[in-house]
Image (cartoon, rainbow, N blue to C red):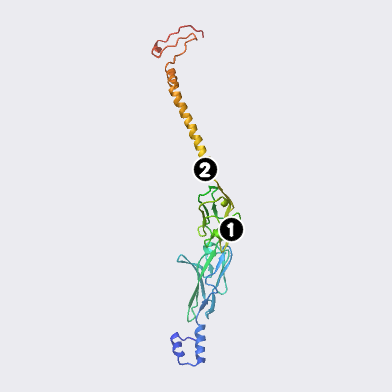
Amino acid sequence: MCTWSQSVLFTCSRKASPTILLFFTVCFTTFAVILRTTNKTPWANEFNSIELSCLIESISTNNPRIEWKKIKNGEPSYVYFEKQISRELENRAYIKEPATLVITNLTRSDTAQYRCEVTAHMDHKTFDEVLIDLVVRVKPVVPRCSVPRAVPVGQSAELRCSEDEAFPRPQYQWFRNQEEIPQDPKSNPKFLNSSYTINHETGTLLFTGLRKEDSGQYHCVAENDAGYAECGPQTMEVYDVNIIGIVLGMLALAGALLVIMVGVCCAYRNGYFIRSREAGNNYKAPDSRDGLDYIKPEDEGGFRHKSSFVI
């Protein structure tokens, strides 16, 4: 059995024959645990499965200790410890011999670093580890789209599109009447005379100086590596402003107000309001015709009947 230390191996290697050196190399390698992985940066879509490979290239210890840890926001937690899957991945993960971790039905919370650790107490090099960065990609959900319904010619308008679930963050693209709106209006004859800017990161489409030809049905698509989603089409109408009609309407309203004011002034000068006020001040109570005398408030204490009545 080989039990030489690394220093002895180094000393012997300077004087030994090639055959002895080969023996020392094989002996030293056999007594060292060495790990490797086939993919240090794997990715998978949400709800799919993934294998985090942890392959043991060299080991002589039987039944080594195998552990998996999840590191998120700098905090490690056990995924596989003492041959048990943690509660977080219970019924969603298992170990594939010799040390590969298989995760099924992935969720977005599984995005993290994973560390495979193998300890072999009987080996010269007793410990090794591999670190794997797992990314779970999340498909976009239907984005929220905001399109103004009616805007006058020559004005500006902002169309907005946003989505909060996708990972990595999606790119946004706008369409008019089912045709993709290009980044540069000059690249498509249908948009040649339009004036706008598109931000594919934020999902905004900003028009400046709208034209009648900009009217149409608009919808937005949010897309990342996991898939895409789109909102339903919404209509934006760009209408002409009738300046002559607005001016004539304002003149007609001003004329009506002027006629009313002149009529009020004429009525006041002719004494209409004065006679109405005097008529109100000369009001007289009607004569009593029912056989009863109505007494004044100061006479209420001496109430008298002027005629008899029968019960």
Q: Quadrant of residue 89?
A: bottom right
Q: Which residue is drawn at 43% across and 86% down?
A: 7
Residue 234 at x, y percent in the picture: 58, 51
Q: What residue type is labelled 1?
A: Pro
Q: Which residue is drawn at 55% across and 76% down?
A: 55
Q: Can residue 29 be seen in this view?
A: yes
Crowd around label 1: few <14 · some 14–19 · many ≥20 (10 Å)? few
| Secondary structure type for disc 2 | helix
Q: What residue type is labelled 2?
A: Ile
Question: 84 or 20, which lies in front?
Answer: 20
Residue 217 at x, y percent in the picture: 59, 52
Residue 226 higher or lower than 262, as above or below: below
Q: Quadrant of residue 269?
A: top left
Residue 10 higher or lower than 150, as above or below: below
Q: Residue at x 51, y 78 (%)?
A: 34
Q: Which residue lies furthest to the right in this view?
A: 178
Q: Residue 243: which disc?
A: 2
Residue for badge 1: 189
Crowd around label 2: few <14 · some 14–19 · many ≥20 (10 Å)? few
Q: Quadrant of residue 186?
A: bottom right
Residue 168 at x, y percent in the picture: 52, 63
Residue 161 higher or lower than 48, as above or below: above
